[in-house]
Amino acid sequence: MIKRAIFLIILIQPFLLTAQEKITISGFVTDAATGEPLINATIINQQKHTGVLANVYGYYSIKSDCINDLFIECRFVGYASQTVNVKTMMDTVINFRLEKGLQIDEITVTTGYRVGYLDRAETGILQMDPSMVSKLPSLMGENDLARAIQLMPGVQSGKEGTGGLIVRGGSNDQNLILLDGMTIYNANHIGGFISIFNPVSINYIKLHKGGFPAKFGGRLSSILDVRMKNGNMQNFEGDISIGTLTSKLSYEGPLKKDKSSFIFAARRTVFDLLVSAYNYLNTDRESDGGFNLWDLNAKYNLKINDQTRLYFSFYKGEDQLFRSSRSDGASDGATYISKSNYSNSWGNTMASFRLNHVFSGKVFSNFTLGVTNYKYKIDNKISVDEKGGNNESQRSIRLTSLTDILFIADFEYFVSREHSFCFGLNAPVHQFEPSNNSTLWEENGVELKDSVWGANNATVPEIALYFSDNYRVSKKLMIDIGLRATSYLIPGKPKLFLEPRLSGNYKLSLASSLKFSYTRMTQFVHLISTSDQAMPNDYWLPSTLNIPPETSGQITLGYFHNFRDKNNYEFSVDLFYKNFENMVELKSGTSFIGGASDWADKVETGGQGLAYGAEFLFEKKTGKTTGWVSYTLSKNSRRFDGINDGNWFPFRYDRRHELSIVVNHKFNDRINLSANWIFMSGEACTLPQYKYLVNTQQFSSEDNVFGTYGEVYYYGERNSFRMPAYHRLDFSFNFVKNLDKGVRTWSVGLYNAYNQYNPYYLYVAKNSTGEPKLFSFTYFPIMPSVSYSYKF
């Protein structure tokens, strides 16, 4: 017994000594002027030349040997670094507040150590500075986050001018889009022409294309993590801008300095107000119509103490098509007024509370409770008022609605500077209303008929538990291994789905590394698309016994190299292979509008998909001239038993080649230029191969037989034709001037500068001689834009 006890003490003694020799240094990294978290700031132990990165809340935790003369340095690109001499033998909290100033080049610092993509066990990551989005050329002068991401490798739009994201062979619904950790189901305005993200309210943008962390799930192709600003904790500031499409206003500041803050941002179209005014003055107030969009972001941030912070986030946005008319008349001696009002609206609403708490510097926790809703609604009302009576007819159709009530608990446990755990749970309750229709008839205020019909509603609970271990195996190898287990209630009983995750980084040298990952993903909600755009009348629907969740598996192998010179050049290449199972698609000739049958009867199920390719990115990150070149070579195909005779066919967004060149140049402090050139292979499409005549009607008179003949087009294999290659050049100039109480910026740009007629779609019609001919339709020729902004 004594021998066993001695053996146990000897066995655990190294761990006890290690624990006794280590101290934990933790805290937050923020901007000294605003209090905003500096996400991914680098915190370095200068003695050991090791370091960590701050998380999405600006929190860090680093272990160190227990010595009484320790130097900890904090760095962030574009800010002056800070170094603190730690002379304590105990765990301590150090909050860094960095000031903007000297552009720090993390390659040439004296420690020789750099924490970044080169060192992390991550693959397929795209991270973009929100300030860069405002400098890039834009459609109609509207700076857009989604369109900026489309300039990176492995990402494309569905159609020209749209903000949809097609990532590594996926589709729009296969992207998990998060705003402050809450799901956004429709991230587009105007059918995808701009995204819902107002750039002035955004602090952080990160896109995962592969190697997904275990904390994320529910989609197959990408995770877009967008974080709102917390609000300036030191001073009040605002931003007003007027553009070709929308006008924006933002205001932020402290409610109590260093204690609490807020931010408020609003955006709205302005041309619809002008159109309505014109209609009001020129139609004798008898008709109106148009389109508008608006959105609102708000956030409250409270620092309860050094260990606890509370956040409230809110977003609401809406698009609306509308028309109204009024006419006066007389019939059979009676006078009447006829009114018609039509409204087609869609939008998102999101609200959440988040609580951060730090336990003893080693465990960081985040709790989220929130609700998110997307709905699409049509209201049509016709009324007739006449002397002595009143007849009214109203029809309201809510085509789709999806609400999530969500609880999230995330934990990070920092074991050592080279080892950390992440674990937690995600528990949403989905409420689906796929197709609800109602009709109401009244006469003289008395209800005559009230009917409701449509597809069945569903409430589906889901719970996911996850765990991941980020560990440095050796000096050169770091891995992140994890597992996500999700229980989803499919009618009848809950089913368990396991999703293993593995990513790794093998450091080849001080400047290069080899990266690898494998991920398994499951998607429990399906988007049934009725068009090839990110349109509002697409339908979110749950998995059922007959329509199981969609799944995917992805393998990625990457190489990253930093040239370690003063210009900070970087080069990366990613090879990916991804397969899809249980995909769904709307059957030909079916519609959800007004339909009462169950939605499951209207879709093709059991589809397969395959996407593979190579992505290249060369980037210059510092200097007066910056930018990147991205190129993607890929193939993307689908197969359904009931489509194309069960044979494989190209996905409609299968583009073999994609090339983007982006250049930003700062002439001086007052003038800067941004330009991009884009080339893509033609989109896959289905066109008729030949036509023939059929007898549609036949009749006889005495000895003669007469007939009527119609033309029928024969369509061959699905997506067997290609549109012409797509290319365009955009550029914009920004003219900046410092005024007494703020900064004024004029932005002037050209979209499609050399007026390339890129086809939006192709169609067959008869020409002037009556022969069928293939025509193309172009939405976006050369389009100038101008915008004005004032920051105060």
Image: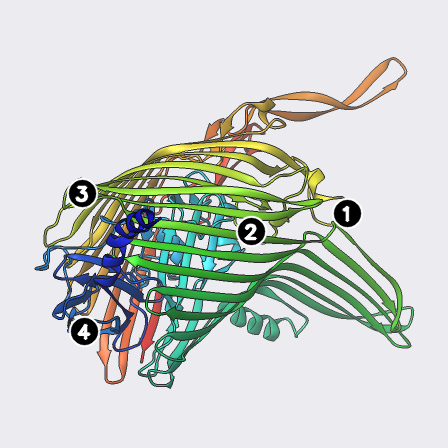
* Labels 4 & 1 near each other (Cβ < 8 A): no
Q: Which kind of residue does numbered mark 4 sit on?
A: Thr
Real-space Cα separation, disc 1 to disc 2, in angstroms: 22 Å
The tag on residue 535 is 2
Q: Nearer the viewer, mark 3 or mark 1?
A: 3
Which residue is pictured at 41% across the width and 70% down the height?
357
Number of other residues with Cα within 10 Å of mark 4, as a class: few under 14, some 14 to 19, many 20 or more: few
Real-space Cα separation, disc 2 to disc 4, in angstroms: 59 Å
Q: Nearer the viewer, residue 106 or 528?
A: 106
Q: Nearer the viewer, mark 1 or mark 2?
A: 1
Q: Is 11 placed above or below 288 here?
A: above
Real-space Cα separation, disc 4 to disc 1, in angstroms: 71 Å
Real-space Cα separation, disc 3 to disc 1, in angstroms: 59 Å
Q: Secondary structure at mark 4?
A: loop
Quickly name the residue at label 1: 596
Real-space Cα separation, disc 3 to disc 4, in angstroms: 36 Å
The tag on residue 88 is 4
Q: Secondary structure at mark 1?
A: loop
Q: Nearer the viewer, mark 4 or mark 1?
A: 4
Q: Nearer the viewer, mark 3 or mark 4?
A: 4
Which residue is pictured at 43% across the width and 51% down the height?
467
The tag on residue 628 is none
